[in-house]
């Protein structure tokens, strides 16, 4: 499993794309898929390789700001929520397994902390304990 939030959410999806078969599941919380004019969305669209990787994407309903200058050389033209939706849509068009959730919150650690348990339940479903394991 690979997980990340914001830019590392984008990075997690990129790494899964570049190393097919290495990761079974990717969690991307508020992934910065808007980055560089949605370059990763376009990379998936132009090179439609269907990965065995499953994706869990979530984003806050308050992540609606557009034309945000993060640094002098980094302009976020589309909103966070729009970038994540575009990535979700291309994954679905290509036949990938996608779980998508929108939470009430913004682009901040408190919102991600509240949303993370659902993502972890998805990625790490309950398993029966090994009957040979003894608590000591």
Image (tube, rainbow, N blue to C red):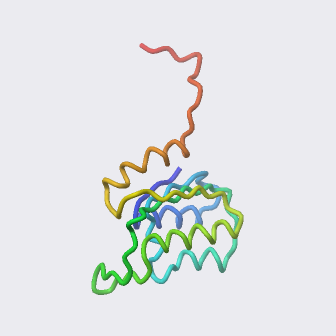
Vertical relation: 66 (above or below) 22: below
- Give the residue at x 53% y 67%: 14
**Residue 41 location (% of width, % of height):** 57, 75
**Residue 31 location (% of width, % of height):** 45, 65
Determine the image quadrant of residue 124.
top right
Judged left or right of residue 31, residue 68 is: left
Q: Nearer the viewer, residue 127 or 119?
A: 119
Q: Nearer the viewer, residue 26 or 82?
A: 82
**Residue 105 location (% of width, % of height):** 36, 59
Judged left or right of residue 45, residue 73 is: left
Determine the image quadrant of residue 129.
top right
- Give the residue at x 49% y 74%: 82
Vertical relation: 35 (above or below) 105: below
Vertical relation: 1 (above or below) 57: above
Determine the image quadrant of residue 103.
bottom left
**Residue 95 location (% of width, % of height):** 71, 64
Residue furthest bottom in the image:
73
Total labels drawn? 0
Judged left or right of residue 25, residue 103 is: left
Judged left or right of residue 77, residue 16 is: right
- Give the residue at x 41% y 13%: 136
């Amino acid at each position: 499993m690979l997980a990340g939030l914001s830019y590392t959410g984008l990075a997690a999806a990129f790494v899964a794309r570049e190393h097919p078969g290495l990761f079974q599941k990717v969690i991307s919380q508020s992934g910065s898929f808007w980055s560089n004019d949605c370059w990763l969305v376009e990379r998936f669209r132009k090179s439609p390789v269907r990965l065995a990787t499953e994706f869990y994407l979530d984003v806050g309903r308050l992540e609606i700001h557009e034309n945000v200058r993060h640094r002098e050389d980094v302009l976020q033209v589309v909103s966070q929520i729009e970038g994540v939706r575009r990535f979700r849509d291309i994954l679905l068009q290509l036949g990938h397994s996608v779980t998508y959730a929108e939470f009430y919150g913004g682009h901040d650690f408190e919102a991600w902390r509240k949303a993370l348990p659902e993502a972890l339940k998805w990625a790490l479903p309950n398993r029966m304990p090994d009957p040979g394991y003894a608590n000591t």
